[in-house]
């Protein structure tokens, strides 16, 4: 395993949320709702960071969405995140705020598997009733 770093401040989660929201637009049927819900769940991370820093979480997440949309249109990789020291959205790579890829990937994988397990249990309970 090679060590790798990602921008911090909720940047990877915001980038993933933006990609999922874009995919949800053209997704058929229930897939649309699943992708949109996953995107919304990922945005809780930067929203919570903003709230804990005393920022308006709605404004901050809106600014973060705009930054990621602009970066995607320009072909840039997504580094925009919540900068709690400056109290605004900045490119976290330029701020040297980084986090290990392994930690981020593990957290997302664990959260996803937990939700899948809960949904399976819910399906079993619903079929028994």
Image: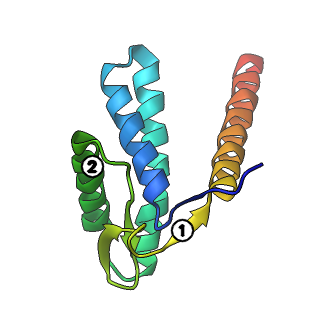
Which residue is outermost to the top? 28
- Badge 1 or badge 2: first in the primary sequence: 2
Identify the image quadrant of the C terminus. Answer: top right
Where disc 1 sits, the SS reads strand
Q: Is residue 75 left or right of residue 45?
A: left
Q: At x 32% / y 78%, what residue is drawn?
A: 55
Observer able to see residue 56: no
Q: Position of residue 67 (x, y in %)?
A: 26, 56
Q: Position of residue 107 (x, y in %)?
A: 67, 53
Q: At x 68% / y 33%, what residue is drawn?
A: 116
Q: In this view, does 16 lie to the left or right of 128?
A: left
Q: Residues within 10 Å of mark 2 (few under 14, many from 20)?
A: some
Residue at numbered disc 2: 71
Which quadrant of the view contains residue 75?
top left
The numbered mark at residue 98 is 1
Observer able to see residue 121: yes
Q: Where is residue 46 in the image (x, y as percent from the top left)?
A: 43, 63
Q: At x 42% / y 28%, what residue is drawn?
A: 33
Cβ atoms at labels 1 and 2 below 8 Å apart: no
Q: Where is residue 56 in the image (x, y as percent from the top left)?
A: 29, 73
């Amino acid at each position: 395993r090679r060590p790798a770093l990602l921008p911090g401040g909720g940047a990877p989660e915001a980038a993933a949320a933006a990609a999922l929201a874009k995919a949800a637009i053209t997704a058929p049927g229930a897939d649309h709702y699943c992708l949109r819900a996953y995107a919304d769940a990922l945005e809780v991370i930067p929203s919570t960071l903003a709230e804990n820093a005393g920022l308006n979480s709605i404004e901050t997440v809106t600014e973060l969405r705009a930054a990621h949309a602009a970066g995607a249109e320009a072909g840039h990789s997504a580094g925009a995140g919540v900068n709690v020291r400056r109290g605004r959205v900045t490119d976290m790579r330029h701020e040297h705020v980084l986090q290990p890829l392994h930690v981020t990937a593990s957290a997302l994988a664990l959260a996803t598997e937990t939700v899948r397990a809960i949904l399976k249990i819910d399906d079993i309970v619903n079929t028994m009733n």
